[in-house]
Image (cartoon, rainbow, N blue to C red):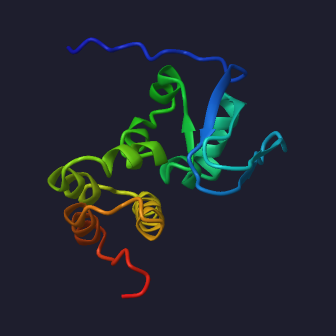
Amino acid sequence: MAQRTNKTKLEESSLVYVVSNFDGVLTYKCPRSGESWLFKNHGASDTMTVGQLRTMLSQKPKYIEKGWIKVDNEEVVQFLNISKYVKNTLTKDDFERLFEEDPEKIEEVLTGLDSDYSKISAFDLARNKYVNGKLRDHFVIRAIEKSLGQKLDPNS
């Protein structure tokens, strides 16, 4: 008989640091507690309780599934069983670093994205860098366009 592993117990009232991974204003109101959060930009942070995160996951799962909210505590990620969403979510900083890699690596990562939000975020960032002249490598541009299926040049 396989030995059963004990799952970590966390108090519902434990505070957890969360960060907005949404490029823009993001709001959330907890249906259970009635408390509201306003994240004014990408990277804005606040705290929530484990219970409020559990409510978010059951009532408004897109906040976690689409990577709009990033839980910055590995123990809580494991406890809520959301690691599958966390590992497939790339931040703006991740994309910035990715666009400095070689084209093959860029294609590999971008074609492996599960989340439509991540694909849109990658495209928006790449297009902005392209339009502002910060993304100039032809091979990198082609890799991004091929992977995301859209042209970065808004005039084409």
Quadrant of residue 55 within the rendered picture: top right
The residue under the point 37% across, 74% down is 152
Residue 18 spot, x, y in % from top left: 62, 34
The residue under the point 25% across, 51% down is 109
Nearer the observer, 20 or 73:
20
Q: Is residue 67 above or below residue 145?
A: above
Q: Quadrant of the N terminus?
A: top left
Q: Quadrant of the C terminus?
A: bottom left
Q: Is residue 116 above or below residue 59?
A: below
Nearer the observer, 151 or 18:
151
Residue 23 spot, x, y in % from top left: 59, 55
Position of residue 35 in the picture relative to residue 28 (left or right): right
Residue 126 spot, x, y in % from top left: 40, 62
The residue under the point 59% across, 17% down is 10
Residue 63 spot, x, y in % from top left: 58, 51
Position of residue 17 in the picture relative to residue 32 (left or right): left
The residue under the point 47% across, 23% down is 74
Nearer the observer, 124 or 33:
124
